[in-house]
Every structure is written in structure tokens, then in C-alpha cells.
Amino acid sequence: MQKYDVLIIGAGIAGLYAAMQLPASKKVLVVCKDIPWECNTFYAQGGMTTALNEADIPLHVEDTMAAGSYHNNKEAVEILSRTSLETTPDIISRGMEFDTDESGNLLYTKEAAHSVERIIHAGGDATGRYMHYFMMVQNKHQLQKNTLVYDLLIDNGRCFGVKATVNYEPTTIYADDVIIASGGIGSLYAYNTNSRTVSADIHGICVEKGIELADMEFMQFHPTVFVETPFARKLLLTEALRGEGAHVVDEEGRRFLFDYDERGELASRDIVARGIFNHKRKTGQKAYLDFSMFEEKWFEHRFPNITHTFARLGYKFPKDKIAISPAFHYSNGGIKCDTNGCIDGMEGLYVIGEAARTGVHGANRLASNSLLEGVVFAKRAVDHLLSKEHKAMKTPLFEKDYGNILHKENDKIYKQKLRQVMWDDIGIIRTRKGLHEAKNLIYDMKNKEIGRLLKLRLNTASAIVDAALARKESLGSHYIESL
């Protein structure tokens, strides 16, 4: 029997920072679905927000609340900002190198809806990749790849571990505490910026177990994404480009975003995404990101990742402009928990990072708060876990197993259909008619001969539709037209 003190599901920033906080004396297992760097952290470009000092906390809180349409849990936002004054120096003191000027001072940048420059970055536009590598190297615990969790072992209000396939073999892993750090739900959408592994399985298990998901109507779409590639994961063009002064233009070269908000390109993400979506729908014109105002050498130094990725596709930045579209980017909602990552009525189960709904993001996430959230709430969950008393418990027998029915023959067809429906009807602009049609379609799919993993995706999709139908008025990233 495989038994651990702590099992961490997910090896992105939240999971790895939690592992960094756990002493080597604990028997810890970190699992990930694929290879460890196939996660959203790895693809994060812009940077990590951090409060500049005590005086900046109220301002950071206000920026976060305003971006979240004041639907946020203010206590969680204050914790996020205040704790950054501990976690950022901690990460730097352990050896993480963020970008600095010649004198060694941290370089800060500004992104949409921030009132001041308070975002630190690494490798120019490869912050997630640098932080992920750094935390992988720091990890002193066992890390196991190719581990796909398909059930939580829950009995009488307590979690005892998981059932998973490890290298395609059904395996039961027991643990005193399980930390869910499995990320969001990106693969549910036809156009998304997420890692292919982020497919809402754990959310779907929670629906099945009666664990509450909250704020699931608030799905965030990134405004500037290159979608003309054959893969589901589209290529993100970081918000920092607009922060540094890039323009969004139509085919006539007009900066049309000022029609939607006086801040133009620097309005909050939901407004910019809707503006681009709407303008394209209304005029039939394409939208472009224009970098021609930048000096070539500076651009390549500040955005090396983007310069080289797109050079391989034949683009020469900053001279060339590029067609953009919004795409699904981030789940503001998730598994409902408190500010310690604890789930109400559930012993031995925590949730952190994008999988969690602490209330920190409200109806719309402020740019670059996500890496910080992963770090801050990982620390708090581990602090809580280490502070509580552990009573020896007899592990019940869990006989039911779905290991042999994870996939069925037609799953792929239904999966594609679901992704299109999510994009068309539960996307950037929603209508009640579209939501009802989506609800019926998801219900029909659930009654087909399908594998367990698709059923879990459909559970999560249902939760998103139901939440969107329940919120009759537009708020933040939930935008509903009256039709």
C-alpha cells in the first residue's frame, strides 16, 4: 500500500511552492498528469505581482477589487497583498533571479488595471518558465509524472487519498493530507492559452462528491492571442506588451478600443476582450497587435520568448503586426475554500492555486495576480496543515474503481463538440438562449456511452452553465446579452 503524509496533485507553481514549504522529514509525493513542465505556470509570460511595500497594500487591494468588480472576498485580497511582502523576499532569498537593472534593483512593469508598476518578471517574458524551473530544482520531495487522478477517496467527510493511473496502470495512493493544485479548466474551450493537461477532471470529481464549486460563471478570456494554429493551446501575447505601449488596431489601423473604454488598450481584460470580440463581429475586420513603435533591440531583449516563438512562424517583430483574438485564459472560480485552502466539511483535503476559489479574484482577475496567488495560498495551506493535530485513522476499503473505463470509443468526437459549445455559448458574450442550448447538449452527452474522464469534464461544464444561468446580470468576465 502506497501511503504518504502529504500528496500534492499538480506540479505548477502552487504545488511546487507547497512542496518547498514541507520539511524533508515528511513523506511527500507530488504528482503531475504528464511531464512536470506541461502546466500553466510554464506558459505564464507577464510576471508576478508583488506589493511594493506596506504603503502599496491598500492600492494593490483596490486595483484587485476594482478589476474583480468588487465581487472579491476583501479579506482574501488583503492576505494576498500583505503576504507577498513575505513570499517574494523568500523566493528571492532562495535564489530565484528576477530581472534587474545594472545596479541590481528589481525591474517592475505595469499591466492593465494596475495603478502603479508592481509586477516583477524573469527572462523578459518567460517568468513562469523561470519560476517553474527554479521550484523544480528546489523540490526535495518525490515527484511522479504520468499520474492521472480520476477519483478522490472520500469517506464520512474525510479524504484518504486518490485513485489514479500511473503510467496507465490503475493505482491507489493513500495520504493523510491531499492538496489539490491541479489548475483550471482550459481544455474545455476550443480556443485557450492553457496547457493541454488542464482539463477540469478534479473539478468534475468534486461535483460528483458534493464539494462546492463557486464563481464558475467568471471565466476569464485573454484579449490578445494568436489563434491561427492547429493546436488547442493558442499562442499568448502577454499583456505586458500593451503595458509597454503596443496598440490594438483594426485593418484600417484604427485604435478602436477607445470606443469601448477611455483607457483603450489598458482597460481591464474583460473590457478589452469584449471590445475586440465585438469589433470583429460588427465590422468583419480582423484585429491586430501593432508593435511598430518599439525599437528592435529593446523589443528582443524585453520579449525574447515572443520574438523567437513567432520568428519560427515567419514573423519579424516588432516590424510586423499580428492578427489577434481573445481566448480562454483563466478560471476565476473553482473549488470553494477558505483562506487556508480548507474545504468546508472536508478533513484532510486542501485546494490551492487556480483550482481554488478563495474569492481573491472576484469576477475578473487582475493581471499577474495568479502566480502570486499560487505562492501565497500554498504557504498558508501548508502552515495550516503543519499546525494541526494528526490523529491515526483506520483507512476504509475503497472498492469502486473506474480505472478500466477512463476512455470510450466516441469520446474524442464528443470532446471536440463540447469545446465548440463552450466557446460559442459559454464564452465571452453569452445569451440565455445559448446557455439553455448548451445545458441541453451537455445533458445529452452525459447520457451517451462515454468514458469517465469525459464525464468529469461534462460535470464541470454543467457547473459553469448553471452558474452562468443563475447570474442574470452581467458582472466582470460574465457578460450576458438579453436575447
Image (spheres, helix red, strand yellow):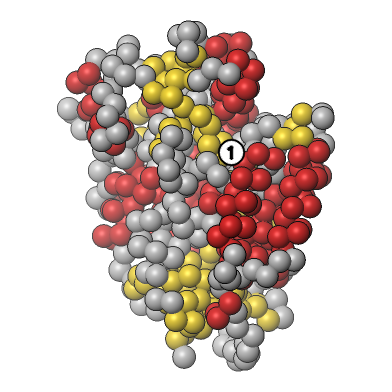
Q: Quadrant of residue 430?
A: top right
Residue 248 x %, y %: 47, 17
- Image coords of residue 327 (percent x, y): 53, 37
Q: Residue at x 75, y 32 (%)?
A: 480
Up/down of 205 relative to 378, above or below: below
Residue 446 at least partly seen: yes
> Which residue is rendered at x = 37% and y = 72% of the image?
144
Relative depth, front residue between 394 and 330:
330
- In the visual, does 312 lie left or right of 18? left
Q: Quadrant of residue 429?
A: top right
The residue depicted at 66 percent of the width and 45 percent of the height is: 421
- Amino acid found under the numbered disc labelled 1: Gln
* Residue 444 position within the rendered picture, expressed as x and y whole percent measured from the top left: 76, 59
Outermost residue on the left side: it is: 102
Depicted 72 relative to depicted 389: above or below = above
Identify the residue position indicated by label 1 in the image: 220
| Place of residue 354 in the rendered image (x, y in percent of width and height, measured from the top left) | 53, 51
Mark 1 element type: strand
